[in-house]
Image: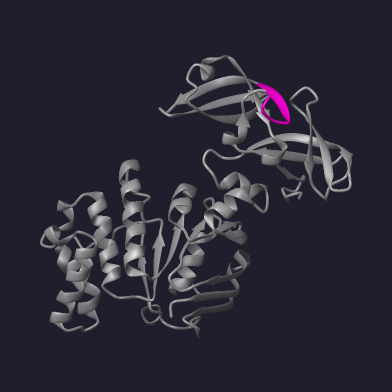
Amino acid sequence: MSSLTLRGVRKSYGNVEVIKGVDLDIDSKQFVVFVGPSGCGKSTLLRMIAGLEHITAGDLEIGGQRMNDVDPSKRGIAMVFQSYALYPHMTVRENMGFALRFAGVAKDQIARQVGDAARILALEPLLDRFPKELSGGQRQRVAIGRAIVRNPQVFLFDEPLSNLDAELRVHMRIEIARLHKELQTTIIYVTHDQVEAMTLADKIVVLRDGIIEQVGRPLDLYDDPANQFVAGFIGSPRMNFLAGSIVEKGVDTVTIELANHGGTRLTLPAGGGAVGDQVALGIRAEHLGLPGTGTADITLDVDVAEHLGSTSYVYANAGGEAVVIEREESRHETGKDRITVSISADKAYLFDSKGQRLR
C-alpha cells in the first residue's frame, strides 16, 4: 500500500507558522500535484513528507503507518530535486546505483535494478557516460532513475523541470506521465506551473499561504473553482475578472452592473449577496463570444494581439481593467483597435468582495 494521509499538519519556524493545518488523503497509485505561488508552502509540505523537515503538529501516515518520527531512509519514499545533484566523477550507472551500494545491496541485484530503470528511461546507451557528457534532460532522467532503483512506495518530485528550457519541459512532462503509467506507483509532484499541474495530475492540491484552497481533478478545478484565487490560478490564460456591484436581488438570482462598461447589466444564478455588494464577474478567455451571441456585449480597447497559428489571444482593456480574449481562426478581427465581445451568464462566475464564490 502506498496511500498517504495528512491530518492537521502544521509547520512553524519560531513564531512564524508556514503550514497552517493541512488535511489531505492521497490514494495509492495517484499522481498528485501541489501547486501554488512562490512561498505558499508546497515545497515545505513535500519536505515534511520526506522527513527533511520536522512536523510541528499533526500526523503523517504512509501505507497506514504513522511516520512523524521515522527516519527519512525508512519511510519508503524517494525524492527527485530541482537540482540534479549527480556525482560528477561517477558514470550514469554508478550514480543510479550509488544508494543501493551504500545500503549493501548485492552487485548482481544492483545491476539488475539499474538495468531495469535504464530501460524504462531510455538511458541504456548512456550508462557509461559521465554527467558532464549529458544534456539537461538526460541528467534529469538519471536523477529520476536514481529514485526508481530504490523501488519506493512514494515518489516525491520538487519542481524537477524548473531548470529545463520550454521545449524540453514539454518532453519531460510526457516522460514523467509515461513513467507513472508504467510504474503504477504514488507520485507527489510540486510545481508553481499550473500547466504542468493540469497536464500531469490525477488530483491537484492548490495551496496559498500554508493552507489548502481546493483539492480536485484538474478539469473539476477549472470548471468549478471554489473561490477567486483558484479561478485565477488554474487555467492559461488566467480567468478575467470584471468589477461590478449587485443592483437587484431575486430569490435565487442576482443582477450586477459592471463598473467599467457603461452600466452593462447581467443577471446570474446566485443565492448569496445583497444589493450594493461589490463583486467580481469571472469569465474565461474562450468564453468571450462574438457580438450578440451572449447575454450582454462589452467593447474593449485592444492593447496587443498574439497570433499563434490556429489560435489568437487578444489583450484588451476597458478603464484600465485588463481582459484576455481567445479567438480561433480570427486574424483579421484581432487586428482591430477596438473589439466587442459577448458575455454569456451561464459561462460566468461570481465572487464576493472576499473572493468567495457566489452560487
The residue lying toward the viewer, choosing from 157 and 83, is 157
Q: Residue at x 21, y 49 (%)?
A: 135
Report x, y in % for residue 127.
Answer: 13, 62
User: Can residue 55 be seen in the rendering of this structure?
Assistant: no
User: Can residue 29 be seen in the rendering of this structure?
Assistant: yes
Report x, y in % for residue 300.
Answer: 65, 21
Q: Which residues are magenta?
A: 292-299
Placement of 268 over or under 313, stated as above or below:
below
343 displayed left or right of 176: right
The reply to whether the magenta stretch includes residue 298 is yes
The reply to whether the magenta stretch includes residue 65 is no
Q: Residue at x 56, y 74 (%)?
A: 6
Placement of 309 over or under 277, stated as above or below:
above
Report x, y in % for residue 261.
Answer: 74, 24
The quadrant in which residue 342 appears is: top right
Report x, y in % for residue 5.
Answer: 54, 75
Image quadrant holding the N terminus, namely bottom left
The residue lying toward the viewer, choosing from 105 and 344, is 344
78 displayed left or right of 359: left
Seen as rendered, the residue at the extreme front is 293
Placement of 16 over or under 193, stated as above or below:
below
Seen as rendered, the residue at the extreme top is 337
Placement of 14 over or under 221, stated as above or below:
below
Q: Residue at x 74, y 26 (%)?
A: 260
94 displayed left or right of 30: left
The quadrant in which residue 207 appears is: bottom right
